[in-house]
Image (spheres, rainbow, N blue to C red):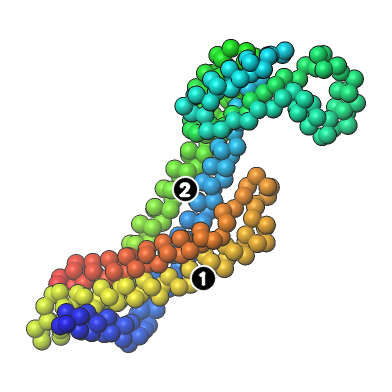
Amino acid sequence: MKLIRIFFRNVRDSFKSVFRNFSLSLASISCITITLVVVAISILLTTNVNNFARLIEKDVTIVTFLKLNITEEEKDKVEQEIRSMDNVDSYTFESKEEISNSMMEDSETFKSIMEQWKAEDSPIQDTFRVKVDDIKQIEKTADAISKIENVSLVKYGQGMVEQLISVFEIVKNISIGVVVALIIVTAFLIANTIKITIFSRKREIEIMRLVGASNLNIKIPFIFEGLFLGILGSIIPVVVTIYGYVTIYENFNGQLFSPFIKLIEPQPFIYYVSGLLVAIGIVVGMFGSWRAVRKYLKI
């Protein structure tokens, strides 16, 4: 019971201290707010860029053309071999008739030409459209498919896909590095601001030491104060994240510039980001207070 009373007394005193030294606390809160807003924007951009990369990778398809006049038995054999491959996620079969009908529906020019063809004269080939688990292994998978008997041609955007994979990897690494760097910079900015706040209260700490307070008893209220500063400083970034992202998502119908660049749905994404911002604010606020009391005031 005694520990619980001490805990709640420290929480109460820390909360009062935030408002008793409001001008100094406001500087820390403002620093936390500004830096967390920048971190929030970076996280939202980074996550959506990575999501766009995943969607593009997921949409890449190996188009497998079968030889003309292939029999049903031979088609089944090709399908079995494709199904047995390790890196194959899914596949669909399109007959030459389905492809012809689709082409004629899409273009009047194709329709006028293809209607004159006899079934046996059609150059259209049956195809399997194969999606892979790991796009980095797509070239290896395409080579394996091309060696299957009765497969005449394999296409998946050779060259361009490899370049896209390389670009996406670079973008992912840079974006993750930017977010981590911003969080580290945020930690140092907030910590330094809190150090100034605590240093200005050096006399208060000296009095606490003179009346016999232990180092731990002096540190704990300041650590809780850092926690409250982190929470208060994360309120505006959380509001900006939730309402800002929802507004952008609704105004742009969930996409940017084209239907291919889709934004992540707001729920529960914005709540995960908001929780992360609050956690960063709390951890950095407590760490900044602890470090300032320990190092700069030589407690």
Instruction: Give the quadrant of the C terminus.
Output: bottom left
Residue lying at 50% horizontally and 24% vertically, measured from the top left: 84
Label pair 2/1, CB-CB below 8 angstroms: no
Residue lying at 82% horizontally and 34% vertically, measured from the top left: 106
Q: Which mark is residue 239?
A: 1
Q: Which mark is residue 47?
A: none
Residue lying at 47% horizontally and 43% vertically, measured from the top left: 172
Please indicate whether residue 172 sits to the left or right of residue 215 in the image: right
The quarter of the picture where residue 208 lies is: bottom left
Helix, strand or loop for disc 2: helix
Viewer-nearest residue: 70 or 125: 70
Write down the residue under mark 2. Answer: 175
x and y percentages locating residue 230 in the rendered image: 36, 71
The three-letter amino acid code for the residue at tag 2 is Ser
The answer, for residue 285, to whether it is visible in the render is yes
x and y percentages locating residue 45 in the rendered image: 53, 53
Instruction: Please identify, in this view, whether the residue under mark 2 or under mark 1 is nearer the observer.
Output: 1
Q: How many marks?
A: 2
